[in-house]
Image (cartoon, rainbow, N blue to C red):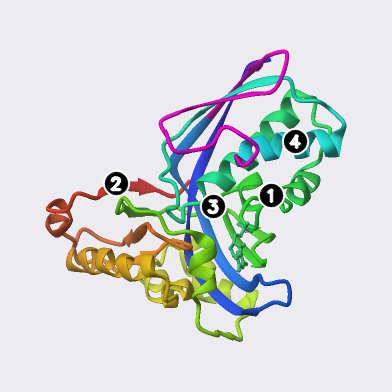
Amino acid sequence: MRLIVPSPAKVNLALWIKGKRPDGYHELITVMHTINLCDTLFFQPSDRFELSIEGSESLPLNRSNLIVKAAQLFKEVTGIKPEVKVKLEKVIPIGAGLGGGSSNAAATLKGLNVIYGNPLSESELVQVASQLGSDVPFFIRGGLAVAYGRGEKLKHYSPASFKLLLVYPGFPCPTKEVYENLPPIERDITIEEAERRIISPLVAGRLREVEEAMENDLEKSKAECVSKVNEVKEVVRACGLKPMMSGSGSSVFALITDQNYDLTPLKSRQWWYKLLNAI
Ligand code: C5P
């Protein structure tokens, strides 16, 4: 069976840190939405599991690749040996806080599940995904969600409609380093508060309100790459937009709430940027 599975990126409209956990992870509440910047996974029958990648030289093809890890975990959980050739067409920048690797892992689980006759329910897929990384469960369904716990617990909403500017400055931010260099943060925030500040105005199309409420506590990290992200934010601000670091960076996005912006300051830089839509 041949199958094509899209693997979209996400942005974090908000990310609030509640505190550090005994296991070293951070307890958080984040609002995520998938966007129309997509990798694609092509599955075709084979006599063993094989992976090839187009569009990126730097990604490993071995066990450290999240696609390979997802296929191994699928085999462990279902007892089914995945005999497929997977080709990944990479578009999403790596180390950009856009969840590309996590999305690829989720797309692998979903693709294998379809090919082998749906041995896992959606909630089982989510549970399996949580073993691959904090952001992986979100991508099983994608769209709009509040993620909590270490990011693996989810409350989904109907996807919203908005435009955004996305800038990738060409350098990566290692997630672990960004978290390790956070000052102590202990926010008293709830899912209901996230709904009030972000979800409700977003679903109602009150984008100005969303823009004002957008916050990312990871911007407070003392990691070196985050200080470089600040320069990117300043250029986006000079365009007349409110810049936000997505997740642990390095990409920066801004909501497009009206036509009152001018990308001239951005055009003189060598950075990758695109106008995109929420999906
Ligand atoms: O879960 P994942 O493997 O994607 O996390 C990568 C790293 O990010 C972790 O090793 C941890 O240092 C940090 N992290 C964290 N708190 C979270 C999620 C990730 O400290 N909620």
Q: Would you name the residue on which mark 2 appears?
A: 274
Q: Are marks 1 and 4 in contact (CB under 8 Å)?
A: no
- The residue beneath circle 1 is 132
Q: What secondary structure is marked by label 1?
A: loop
- Mark linked to residue 29: none
Mark 1 CB lies closer than 8 A to ligand 1 = yes
Q: Residue at x 64, y 50 (%)?
A: 136
Q: Amino acid at mark 1?
A: Leu
The quarter of the displayed image where residue 188 is located: bottom right
Comparing 64 with 150, the one in front is: 64
Q: Earlier in the sequence, mark 2 or mark 1?
A: 1
Q: Nearer the observer, disc 3 or disc 2? A: 2
Q: Mark 3 or mark 2, which has the lower sequence index?
A: 3
Q: CA distance from mark 4 to mark 2?
A: 35 Å
- Looking at the rendered image, the quarter that the N terminus falls into is top right
Q: Is mark 4 within 8 Å of ligand 1?
A: no
Which quadrant of the view contains residue 76? top right
Within 10 Å of the Cα at label 1, are there few (<14), some (14-19), or many (20+) other Cα atoms? some
Which residue is at the far right?
79
- Circle 2 Cα neighbour tier, 10 Å, few/some/many (<14 / 14–19 / ≥20): few
Q: Secondary structure at mark 2?
A: strand
Q: Residue at 35% of width from left, 47% of height from top?
A: 276
Q: Quadrant of ligand 1?
A: bottom right
Mark number displayed over residue 72: 4
> Depth-wise, is mark 4 or mark 3 nearer the camera?
4
**Segment tinted magenta in the rendering:** 41-65
Tell me if mark 3 has few (under 14), some (14-19) or many (20+) residues whose alpha carbon lies within 10 angstroms of its own: some
Q: Label 3 belongs to which residue?
A: 159
Q: Residue 248 appears at what percent x and percent y?
A: 47, 63
